[in-house]
Amino acid sequence: MTFSESISTVFSKYATAKGRATRSEYWWFYLFNVLVSLGATLMDYVMGTSVIASIWSLVVLVPNICVGIRRLHDINRSGWWIIVPIVSLVMLLMPSDPNPNEYDIVEE
């Protein structure tokens, strides 16, 4: 998955925790978020406010949580692991499980 595909996929599944997210989808979106956050923080610094970075943080709060949960589903783990920071970070780095699992979305 490319950088732009990742961003569009995450925002198209804005509040969807069902399904799976590949490692590239998660980390490309993470990079995008870091870059935009740095830009927003820089703009806030220049303007002497903290409004832009705060708004950006609120805009991506739900997508960040949901893509993290979908990433954990991709390695066949429960999304609840997202609340354990160190453990979830290690799990987010693991390769995808190529086998079907209970988190796959089945079209009816």
Image: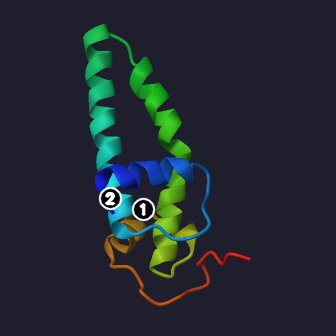
**Disc 2 to disc 1, how far (Cα)?**
16 Å
Q: Is residue 53 above or below residue 93?
A: above
In the rendered image, is residue 64 in sight?
A: no
Name the residue type under label 2. Answer: Trp
- Please tell me which of labels 2 and 1 falls first in the chain: 2
Q: Is residue 104 above or below residue 71?
A: below
Q: Quadrant of residue 32?
A: top left
Residue linked to disc 2: 27
Disc number placed over residue 62 in the picture, else none: none
- The x and y percentages for residue 3 are 30, 52
Residue that lies at the very extreme toward the right in this rendered image: 108
Name the residue type under label 1. Answer: Pro
Residue at coordinates 74% horizontally, 77% vertically from top-left?
A: 108
Residue that lies at the very extreme toward the bottom in this rendered image: 99
Q: Residues within 10 Å of mark 1 (few under 14, many from 20)?
A: few
Report the front residue among 80 and 65: 65
Residue linked to disc 1: 85
